Image (spheres, rainbow, N blue to C red):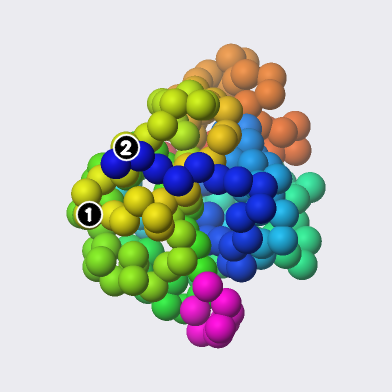
Amino acid sequence: MSQEKAKSEDKLNVILFGGSFNPPHIGHRHVLSNILKQFPTSKVYICPNYVSPFKLNEKKFSKDEIWSLCLAEFESFLSTNVILWDEEIKKDQISFTIDTLKTLQLIEKNNPISLVIGEDNLSQFHQWKSYQNILELIDKLIVVRRHTNVPNSIECPNFISADQMIVLDNPIVTMSSQSIRNKPNDELELNSILPKTKELFLKFLGQNLSNH
């Protein structure tokens, strides 16, 4: 079963784009750019988390540091229709997508909500907490390409309806937040993060190292 391709005429009311953003980088900006290009009338909530159920032992910046990095990296996108939302970053406990969606549903009331996930998470989506409830609650599941280049199709898992899945035509950026954190300061790729974000990143990284 193949996926439904995102078309310019697709209209999605509200889109939730979550992640650890630890730090945010060019790959996240590309995803956001493609979401806004393919769904220009949508309202997008960028939702950084602090404790992901899938990254419990990951080296972290503090909540305030992640928030500042996101403000810097996504600054040019933010508007009344592109919102940096603190629903998950403000929590000390694990953030589950189902809870975040329910909160967003209260804010957006009658507006259908679609959820962005990475291609690498698609086959394990049934392991997410209350994944069936998530699928019942959302309008579309928007899949970001991680490995499969355009125009190749991405297989839809049998536990997801093919009509509910949309695949972005985003460029594949082979970069991760972990790889950025693990690079020596003088080896950070020029365009991996914006200059303002890089300045904060190196400042926060230095503070964190000095605290150990």
The stretch in magenta equals: 105-112
Give the numbered dot on residue 210: none
Question: In this picture, is 156 found above or below 146?
Answer: below
Q: Is residue 111 magenta?
A: yes
**Badge 2 element:** loop
- Please give the residue where the numbered disc 2 appears in the rendered image: 155
Instruction: Where is residue 192? Give x, y as percent.
Output: 63, 26
Horizontal side of residue 15 vs 163, given as left or right: right
The quarter of the image holding the N terminus is: top left
Q: Amino acid at mark 1?
A: Phe
Horizontal side of residue 166 vs 76, given as left or right: left
Q: Residues within 10 Å of mark 2 (few under 14, many from 20)?
A: some
The quarter of the image holding the C terminus is: top left
Instruction: Where is residue 51? Give x, y as percent.
Output: 37, 57
Residue 12 in view here? yes
User: Residue 27 falls in which quadrant of the image?
Assistant: top right
Horizontal side of residue 54 vs 12, given as left or right: left
- Please give the residue where the numbered disc 1 appears in the rendered image: 159
Q: Amino acid at mark 2?
A: Glu
Give whichever of 176, 13 is nearer the camera: 13
User: Residue 95 falls in which quadrant of the image?
Assistant: bottom left
User: Residue 197 falls in which quadrant of the image?
Assistant: top right
Give whichever of 17, 170 is nearer the camera: 170
**Alpha carbon of mark 2 to alpha carbon of mark 1: how far?**
12 Å
